[in-house]
Image (cartoon, rainbow, N blue to C red):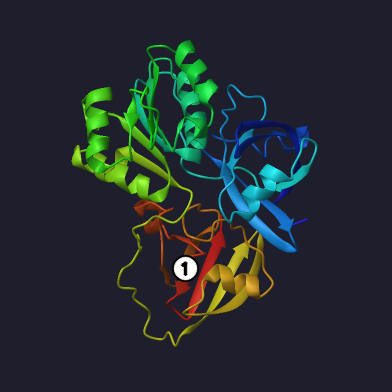
Amino acid sequence: MTEGFFPLTIKKLVRETADATTFYFDIPAELKDTFVYSAGQYLTFEVEIEGEKVRRSYSLCTYAGVDSEPAVTVKKVDMGKMSAYMNSVLKEGDVMLVMPPMGKFTLVPEASRTQHYVLFGGGSGITPLLGITKAVLVAEPNSQVTLVYANRNLDSVIFKQALLDMEKTHEGRFKVHHNYDSAPITYFGLKGMLSSDKVQSIVKSKIGGPFDTYQYYICGPGPMMEVIKDGLKGLGVNSDRVHTEYFSAPTSKNSADEKPQQETDFAGVSQITLTVYGRTHTITCDQNTTVLNAAMKQGIDPPYSCTVGVCTTCRAKVTVGKLHMLEREGLSDAEISEGYVLTCQSVPRSAQITLKYE
């Protein structure tokens, strides 16, 4: 069994739509502490498909204060090996290899807090937002949630009935505004693709101000998320109030260092000392190879999942030397200043580097 992964049994399957399934997992007593999670975090899975080891991360749609078992919802996507496998092959009672919960797109509720949360979800981006919504409604009695949920059409809505039930149960504190790319002429709600102007119009007309006092959570397709961020920026919302979770690389590159600097003694090959799962290894890595790829080629299997710089599973802290990140969307400015990097995106810029996976 791959280090860092644990076998979990699928306790229940729920077909949400024609191409989306929710998987509930039984957590044995000895792993209860290992799989404690916050609303909005994700699980990383590993399976072997046609002889190839495949890893993918999927957001938890549950909240431990309400749901007895953690669950993820997986939507089948074109060319998606893992999503197709999970939707078509797996059944109740099957065992999957799973890493403990990770992720920073979280909300830890406080009973004394009074806050209006505005959530934007697109397609399967609803998954972490559902857990976050549950956390607020159950554990922050003075707070409220407004969800703007974009989908292709009425049939593609994940958690349709659950959202309707939550609106009824928490009337006055939870409101959903559905937006469909295409909808019947009899539908009088929001229609058409989202744009920056439309986002601003929705916030102004459906929610109202003061816009800069809300906390915004966004998850969905990359282009949609960029449009929403632009719209909120146009409303004067500070970036520290906007929380994002990308399922794929964003459309606009977010390099940590547009002009990478390197140490004067760096000749193009680095010796890297890395600590992973409590063990220390030494590898070599050239200036065009990421730390993660170099480690794997030399027989080390560090934690990783997306490999495009958004999930942060491969995050490590550098204590000696310099690395250049090609993409850093998953890290905050504060984390970067503390020395954290995403090893799937980091290439060496000094002869000696020391880092530790945390």
Decide: few, some or many residues near mark 1? Use Cα within 10 Å; few <14, some 14-19, many ≥20: many
What residue sits 47% from the left and 43% below the top? 104
Amino acid bearing label 1: Ser
Judged from the image, the secondary structure of the residue bearing numbered disc 1 is: strand
Q: Nearer the viewer, residue 204 or 345?
A: 204
Picture layout, residue 110 above or below residue 287: above
Horizontal arrangement in the rendering, residue 91 relative to residue 303 (left or right): right
Coordinates of residue 153 in the picture (x, y in percent): 45, 34
Horizontal arrangement in the rendering, residue 39 relative to residue 258 (left or right): right
Q: Quadrant of the C terminus?
A: bottom right
Picture layout, residue 257 above or below residue 163: below
Q: Nearer the viewer, residue 281 or 302?
A: 302
What residue sits 60% from the left and 76% below the top? 283
Q: Nearer the viewer, residue 274 or 326?
A: 326
Picture layout, residue 146 above or below residue 21: above
Coordinates of residue 239 in the picture (x, y in percent): 28, 43
What residue sits 58% from the left and 36% below the top? 37
Residue bearing the label numbered 1: 346
In the orientation shown, which residue stands out farthest toward the right? 93
In the orientation shown, which residue stands out farthest toward the front? 185
Image quadrant in which you'd find residue 144 = top left
Coordinates of residue 345 in the picture (x, y in percent): 47, 65
What residue sits 23% from the left and 24% below the top? 205
Horizontal arrangement in the rendering, residue 14 relative to residue 264 (left or right): right
Coordinates of residue 243 in the picture (x, y in percent): 37, 41
